[in-house]
Amino acid sequence: MAPATPAPAQDFNRAYATGTFAIVVLLSATSGIVDAVAFERFGVFVANQTGNLVIVALGLAKEQSLETRVASVIALVTFTVGVFVAVKFRKILRKHMPQSRARVIMLAIEAALIAIAGLCVLIWGEQQAAFVAVFLLSLAQAFQAAVITRIVGLAIQTVVINTALVQSAEAWVGGRKRASTIAFGTPIGYLIGAFAGALLLRFPPPTALWSALLTAAAATAIAHRIRLAGANID
């Protein structure tokens, strides 16, 4: 007698799938926008730290402008230290409140950091505020990286796409189609955000950063609604 085929893992609750997918897409779009802006204007990344390591290495191996070297170091160091700070802050928050509420607070902090970066660029101009903007945007992405580490039972990061692609494939093969679609929202959102950021760079600064603020704020609002509904999207 042939052994019974194991049932696929239970898929994510359909009632919150759309909202969760929107959060993943919006946060990934935020990363895509700020990376497009930072790379085009300052020659560095603020979310994709793998790319920043390459930029730092290239700066050591060949001649690059001093501004690019400084900006890449600022982004890499700020993101690295920022992740440790954000994880510690998340731990403190979770001692006093549910994870869903802590997530909303941390996403609100990310949106605030993007808003401050946009104001600095608006007041001082892109060139004068370049290093400050790189610092603030890298810190914002560090908070985003710390707040979204696991969603719908999958290890997903919205600041990079590699892990999300693997998780999406594994969920699909395992019969979790909705979870797979949610995970695939990361490359979709990042592509949309990077494209939108590139287009908006044609307009006066900080138009592109305002769009990143909009996507981050929208993700925060949706996360808040899901929290009020009492859903667990982890």
Image (cartoon, rainbow, N blue to C red):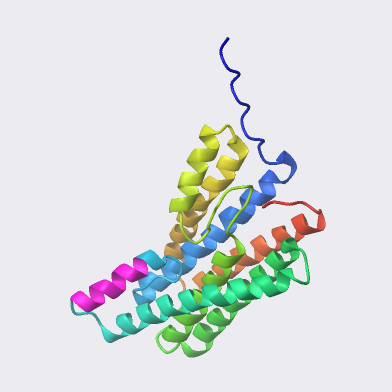
Q: Quadrant of the N terminus?
A: top right
Q: Residue at x 56, y 83 (%)?
A: 119
Residue 186 as seen in the image, left or right of residue 151:
left
Q: Residue furthest right?
A: 229
In the picture, measured across the screen, residue 85 lies left or right of residue 43, that is right
Q: Residue 15: give x, y in percent of width and height.
A: 75, 42
Task: Spot the residue most to the left.
Answer: 62
Q: Does residue 189 appear in this view? A: yes
**Picture residue at 46% right of the left edge, 64% below the top:** 197
Residue 224, image x and y in percent? 75, 61
Spot the residue most to the front.
1
- Give the prevailing secondary structure in the magenta stretch: helix
Q: Position of residue 19 (x, y in %)?
A: 68, 50
Q: Nearer the viewer, residue 122 or 21?
A: 21
In the rendered image, residue 92 lying in the magenta stretch gets the answer no
Viewer-nearest residue: 118 or 86 = 86
Taking 218 as reference, is 234 above or below it?
above
The quadrant holding residue 100 is bottom right
Which region is colored magenta?
Answer: 51-61
Tally of numbered tags: 0
Residue in the picture at 50% in, 39% down: 170
Can residue 202 be seen in the rendering of this structure? Answer: no
Asked where in the image residue 179 lies, by quadrant, the reply is: top right
Q: Name which residue lies at 19% across and 80% down.
A: 63
Can you give x and y, in whole percent of width and height, for residue 185 in the image? Answer: 54, 49
| Vertical relation: 55 (above or below) 127 | above
Is 12 located above or below residue 113 in the figure? Answer: above
